[in-house]
Image (cartoon, rainbow, N blue to C red):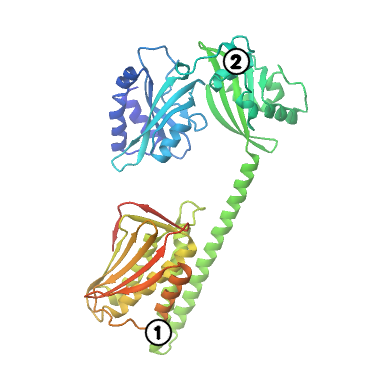
Amino acid sequence: MSETTLHQLCQIYTELTFDEIKVLEDVASTLQLYADLNNAYMFIDCMMKDSDQAIVVAEAFPRTSEAIYENSVVGKIVFESFEPGVFYSYRTGKKSLTNQAVTQEGKTVEQSVIPIKNNKHQVIAVLISEEEIYKHMPISSSYKNVSFGQEELKEVLGGHSREVPLVSDLLMEIFLLTDKEDRLTYSNPAGVNFISEMTQLDKIQNQNILELLPFLQSIYDFKEDVFVFDLTVDRKNLIVKKIRVKEKEQLKGTLLIIQDVTELRTKEKELMMKSVVIQEIHHRVKNNLQTVASLLRLQMRKGFPEESKVYFEDTLNRIYSISSVYELILSNSNADDEDVNIIELTKKVSSTLVLNEYLKKVNLIIESNGNKILTTSRKAVSIALIINELVQNSLKHAFPEDVEGDIIVSFYSNKDFLELHIFDNGVGMQEPKSSLGLEIVHNLVLNDLNGEFRYVPVEQGTHAVVTFPISSEVIIYHEKENINS
């Protein structure tokens, strides 16, 4: 496997950057050494862009042992159904040691996987070591005289004793094994029921599978030794896993593992429709809020007492804060994701207030302190209104006329609580006055967030703190992030 080929595969099939590909090239340059040292087969797999599958981009075979692989698998697709350890390591960033896997040539191996990470500690690929499973699991002599179907199925599934039922007999999945002439030699109970339902026949043993189930023709014609297919047959949604069973390059038969996912697909469609309805509701709520805001602005332009203007502006800001929550939900690339990023929400709500033409000299600083905070839309509305009122309070009272200064919005978290700090270095308040805005804050913190609100004495300016417990509706990730506006 040349580095040039690795580079080309990564560029064509993955979203890896040039620097990340260089990391893989460095690892690939050591594969042969490790393959010979450990007498194991070494691979590098990468996730494919716009796909749930991975692809093999590098390999090295030991030069001192009998070959497990008859051909190169570079450029072959990797399915989670056959190599779950690969995808576990991708998702978790953890090692996956001594798992059974099925190779691209349909052989069962013992597989260990470790993640390869970039300089940001993100998983970009996985390093795989494979050994022949029968090194560790001797074949029982009780297999010597069993039938072709049972023996071949035993080999594919890992070599367990026939003194107990085959695992396949106990599963809901359909197991069908055919010989090289495509005659059915083994079917588990689920398979018998499936074929009987599809054909209305009782006698199926040794029948040609393609005559029984003609829709399998394209699967048998496909020459890959291991592959996964999605089929729709008679309103049934099926996932078909095919493994060609070989011995010394000669085809001995084909194993099919069929899963009926009709009910699952139906539920997915129902959830998709529900998601569309929820998105439409969010659109309508946002549009209705904008309509109300437009009516208020129209009323302001029609003329009314100057002393009333501030109340209209405060109301408009509150409407905009709520609308911001729905804008962020609708901007999510995942339509099912209703979680709101509180840091982004804070930036959106606060920045609009600070950018008021009369307050251009006030600098807004938002500090996440390594926290990425996601919460439900319900809690997000409350937090947006709280931030709106407290930042607006600082703008009104801390910086009269053209006074320059800073407003800092910070988030801190520990195991049980999240704290929101809003601090300004303005003229400060001797005693916070009761107002509609502060009453809104007190009620939202107490009733919606189950938290507490207080002012902290400081030498200069004003320091407000909102503390509330972390619950199932609040998800916190720790990362380095600092947003300045």
x 58%, y 50%: residue: 272
- Under tag 1, what secondary structure? helix
Q: Position of residue 351 (x, y in %)?
A: 33, 67
Q: Which quarter of the image is occupied by the C terminus? A: bottom left
Residue nearest the viewer, comparing 372 with 284: 372
Which of these two is toward me, 222 or 265? 265
Which residue corresponds to mark 2?
A: 151
Helix, strand or loop for disc 2 = helix
Q: Residue at x 50, y 20 (%)?
A: 107
- Local packing at callout 1 (Cα closer than 10 Å; few below 14, some 14-19, many 20+) is few
Name the quarter where the N terminus is drawn: top left
Say if 89 sits above or below 411 in the image: above
The alpha-carbon separation of the residues under discs 2 and 1 comes to: 86 Å
Q: Indicate which disc, 2 or 1, sits on the residue closer to the N terminus.
A: 2
Q: Nearer the viewer, residue 269 or 89?
A: 89
Which residue is under mark 1?
Answer: 309
Kind of residue sitting beneath label 1: Lys
Image spot of residue 462 (x, y percent): 28, 75
Label 2 is placed on what type of residue?
Glu
Q: Nearer the viewer, residue 97 or 58?
A: 97
- Look at 76% across and 21% down and name the residue there: 203
Furthest-bottom residue in this view: 305
Q: Place residue 422 in its image quadrant.
A: bottom left
